[in-house]
Amino acid sequence: MSAVAYSLHRPELFGSLRRGEIALHHAMGSTRFFARRATILRAGEEQDLIYRLRSGWVCRSRMLADGRRQILGVSVPGDLVGLTTMLFARSLDSLTCLTRTAVNVVDQAQLWELAASNPDLALFLLFQLANARRRQDNWLVGLGQCTAEERLAAMLLDARERLRIRGLLGKGAFRLPLTQQDIGDYLGMTPVHVNRVLARLRRSGTIAVKRHVVLLRDIEALERTASPMADLWASEGPWPQ
Amino acid sequence: MSAVAYSLHRPELFGSLRRGEIALHHAMGSTRFFARRATILRAGEEQDLIYRLRSGWVCRSRMLADGRRQILGVSVPGDLVGLTTMLFARSLDSLTCLTRTAVNVVDQAQLWELAASNPDLALFLLFQLANARRRQDNWLVGLGQCTAEERLAAMLLDARERLRIRGLLGKGAFRLPLTQQDIGDYLGMTPVHVNRVLARLRRSGTIAVKRHVVLLRDIEALERTASPMADLWASEGPWPQ
DNA sequence: CGTCGGCTTGAGGGAAATCAAACGATGTGG
DNA sequence: CCACATCGTTTGATTTCCCTCAAGCCGACG
């Protein structure tokens, strides 16, 4: 798995990417805190800030006039959030905190300036966007072609893998701070149906869930179920771990 | 509508973007031709080329092991294709021609070189990626939350708008070179159901379709139907027209 | 102790899938 | 020029996955 993901990338860019990541790390400014369910950025609002998630989970979502909501992405600590505000002054999406959250902030104008003089940083930003796009492709496949069960299995494996990459995966269970409503809005199904699929997985002994803490008991079975979306949870970093 | 899309962007970048686009235009090299249904790039293959579509339509798709296929995007003349091969040596998607096609080619290494010394070009590439991402967000909303009818209406309006921006929209009808199978793979439904929804729209006098030529008779009605995905077909260019 | 947010479970309905067959164009070769 | 195969569309009958509506439950918290 890791080997496949590895060979996806252009090894000649590794060094540059790593330097770019470090440069960004140094550019990050003051820290801000948000409560659970707080909105970092409302859809349609102007915004000049780019965030880096230090702790907590955030989701990017879009609300329809009739109340339907689609969660477009979920971010875990270490992720860059709101990068597109460098190019679009207004966002069409909202950023909402799924948990209490701490973020580092940097102004987009300042980031432009840095990136202009630091090709490594520019490359890193480009890479972030390309990576986000690849992730979205995978979700498009899921939403367009996969059953509720396949999507749910894929989401669980994806969450696990992303936490693992960030070194946030304890041994065994991990915390997944999404309500079943959130999961539904993420995977394009009703919360009721999320519950039923979860119940099925629980009864079959594949997973155990309790108070937002998830234990994947039978990862093989999950991978078999989610196999149509296998690209999703393949390692996403440019470098092997 | 145009006003909304306009205010989305950062006006201070317009000049730079336009210069970047021109630079890219000049960088494009030789022309290649492909037949209908030809594969420009197979999933998993290594690739060092970036394409600019001169004429014809191309789609980017992903095939699942069991035969299901999701079309991730459709490109019309003028669009840049395969940009992510700059960052990922291998593509997970295939590029297939929906019609006879002519493309301009440029090597990714060469493009890197140019972009390194030309910030306008680099910005333009970044912008392309960000824009693609925004488009995908819209489709995610569609696939996750919208009914077959809403998605189909949105697709028709989107196709029209994109052709219009490129100056390829005659008055009245336009050619949409997707089979109902393709449309189904794009919108996440079966070709049979595509046919039924099309038939419904035809009977209600909203559209007329014949041999891949589409006439939108009642655009207002379509816009009402597709309103949950309204952001999609809003003008996507960085500059007003 | 009551209330509130989130989870669970049941009954019934509806949108879209599946299966199946016929039809219409287009092209091809005898 | 007609048989014939191919590709795409159209339509019908049936099934299934998921949604809707509704009610009860559980734990947290003031």
Image: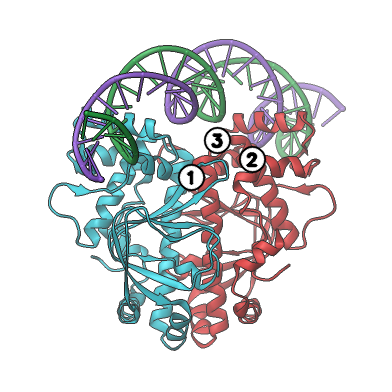
Chain colours: A cyan, B red, C green, D purple
For residue B89, which quarter of the picture? Answer: bottom left
Residue indicated by mark 1? A69
Residue found 80% across the figure and 33% down from its top:
B205
Image coordinates for residue B155, horizontal then vertical, percent: 64, 46
Quadrant where the C terminus of chain A sits is bottom left
**Mark 3 / mark 2, whichever is N-terminal:** 2
Secondary structure beneath label 3: loop
- Dot 2 and dot 1 within a common chain: no
Label 3 near label 1: C-beta < 8 Å? no
* Mark 2 and mark 1: Cα distance apart in space: 19 Å
Residue indicated by mark 3? B189
Quadrant where the N terminus of chain A sits is bottom left
Type of amino acid at the residue the image marks with label 3: Met
Q: Chain of mark 2?
A: B
The label nearer to you, 3 versus 2, is 2
Residue found 36% across the figure and 51% down from its top:
A231
Residue indicated by mark 2? B152
In the visual, does A35 lie left or right of B47?
A: left
* Front position in the image: A180 or A79: A180
Image coordinates for residue C18, horizontal then vertical, percent: 49, 24
- Dot 1 and dot 3 within a common chain: no
* Mark 3 and mark 2: Cα distance apart in space: 10 Å
Image coordinates for residue B37, horizontal then vertical, percent: 61, 48
The label nearer to you, 1 versus 3, is 1
Q: Chain of mark 3?
A: B
